[in-house]
Amino acid sequence: MRNKIIFIGMMGCGKSAVSSCLAQKTKIQKFELDEIFVQKYGNIADFFRNFGEDEFRKKETEILKDTLKNREYIISAGGGVILSQSNRSLIFNNENLVIYLKAQAETIFERIKDDTARPLLKVENPKQEIKNILQKRQKYYEMANMAVSVDNKTIEEIGNEIWKRL
């Protein structure tokens, strides 16, 4: 059983819920990088508006580095954490089991279409924007040790599938 697990994937793919499910099964502490960000710096959408995405990504990297200092963890990473080469070096190494929760753009859109706190989706055509973001990030997500499709599955089904594969 690995004791350093990181969940990656697009917003709305279920990283928070699935990592909580796995944390309950393994008794390993879960860290939600976006929640830590909010505790330290406030609302993400406000931060984006006031300081921009680049500054957000810098703070996200600091939080990731701090969290990785723990002896064991289950991390729910923000969807864009893999955009930075330095973050990819921190995430994709022999210590971590990286699990990509893979969702189709339509699934993501249906799950988050009413969520007004998604700064990257404050555009005219959010469904197309999801497709664009997914296309840019796909090659990085695919670097994961394990990919699990989440389309048409409950959190419990996804958690059980991962549990069996561990």
Image (tube, grey):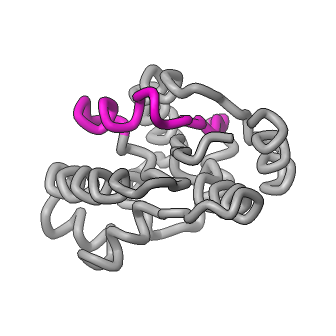
On screen, residue 38 above or below 32: below
Q: Position of residue 7 (x, y in %)?
A: 55, 45
Queried whether the magenta region covers residue 93, the answer comes back as yes
Residue appearing at x 84%, y 47% in the figure: 160
Queried whether the magenta region covers residue 156, the answer comes back as no
Residue appearing at x 83%, y 53% in the figure: 154
Q: Position of residue 87 (x, y in %)?
A: 29, 38
Q: Position of residue 114 (x, y in %)?
A: 59, 66
- The residue lying toward the viewer, choosing from 42 and 26, is 26
Q: Is residue 144 left or right of residue 70?
A: right
- Magenta segment range? 82-104
On screen, residue 32 above or below 5: below
Q: Is residue 31 left or right of residue 45?
A: right
Q: Quadrant of the N terminus?
A: top right
Residue appearing at x 43%, y 52% in the figure: 78
Q: Quadrant of the C terminus?
A: top right
